[in-house]
Image (cartoon, rainbow, N blue to C red):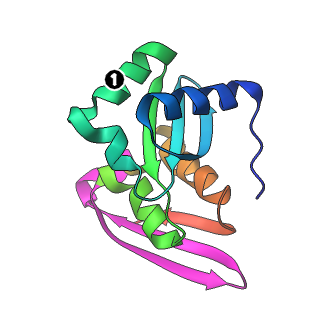
Amino acid sequence: MAMKFNAQTLRYISIFEAATNAEVKDCIEKDDTIIFILYPNNIKKVLQNKGEKIRMLRNMLQKNVVVYEFSPDVAKFTRNLFRRYGVKNVKVNNDNGEFSIVVYVDPKEKARAIGRNGRNLHLAKEILERHFPIKNIVIA
């Protein structure tokens, strides 16, 4: 679960932290998107002024910028990852040290939560696996 950052990712983290004054725990570049995982209680610094800092970063980096707040609680972190899809509940089973997660979202948002070809679900699993031992994750 050790995270490795390349020079480009370290550059993104440095720019993000300088622009927002928020502490980055993790950074993942996927296609045209950069995902920043922030330490707890840092997200307010980024989202103040109606997301002005995010818009500035998008223009500066020429990429879509997405931020999530980390939590050492796997259920809370999962809830943060799926927040925009109307999370109703998150159930976590600890199966011999590996987590099986079921995310209950608003039925109208289920398809969006999964994403085209499972893209959002796979990305959420990839993010979670960088911080926790994940067996599987299901959207219900």
**Side of 95 relative to 41 (left or right):** right
Image quarter (top left, top right, bottom left or bottom right) of the C terminus? bottom left
Q: Residue at x 32, y 48 (%)?
A: 44
Q: Main secondary structure of the magenta part?
A: strand
Q: Is residue 115 visible?
A: no
Task: Please say whether residue 119 is one of the residues in the magenta stretch.
Answer: no
Q: Quadrant of residue 2?
A: bottom right
Viewed as shown, does residue 42 lie left or right of 101?
Answer: left
Mark 1, secondary structure of its residue: helix
Give the x, y percent position of residue 76: 43, 68
What residue is at 24 percent from the left and 53 percent from the top? 108
Which residue carries the number 1 mark? 55
Residue at the image point whose x is 59% and y is 58% from the top: 128
Is 92 covered by the magenta stretch?
Answer: yes
The residue that appears at 26% across and 60% down in the rendered structure is: 106
The vertical placement of 26 against 100, above or below, is above
Which segment is the magenta one?
A: 86-112
Figure check: 4 above or below 20: below
- Along the viewing direction, whichever of 7 and 125 lies nearer the viewer: 7
Q: Residues within 10 Å of mark 1 (few under 14, many from 20)?
A: few
Answer whether residue 103 is visible to the viewer in this image. yes
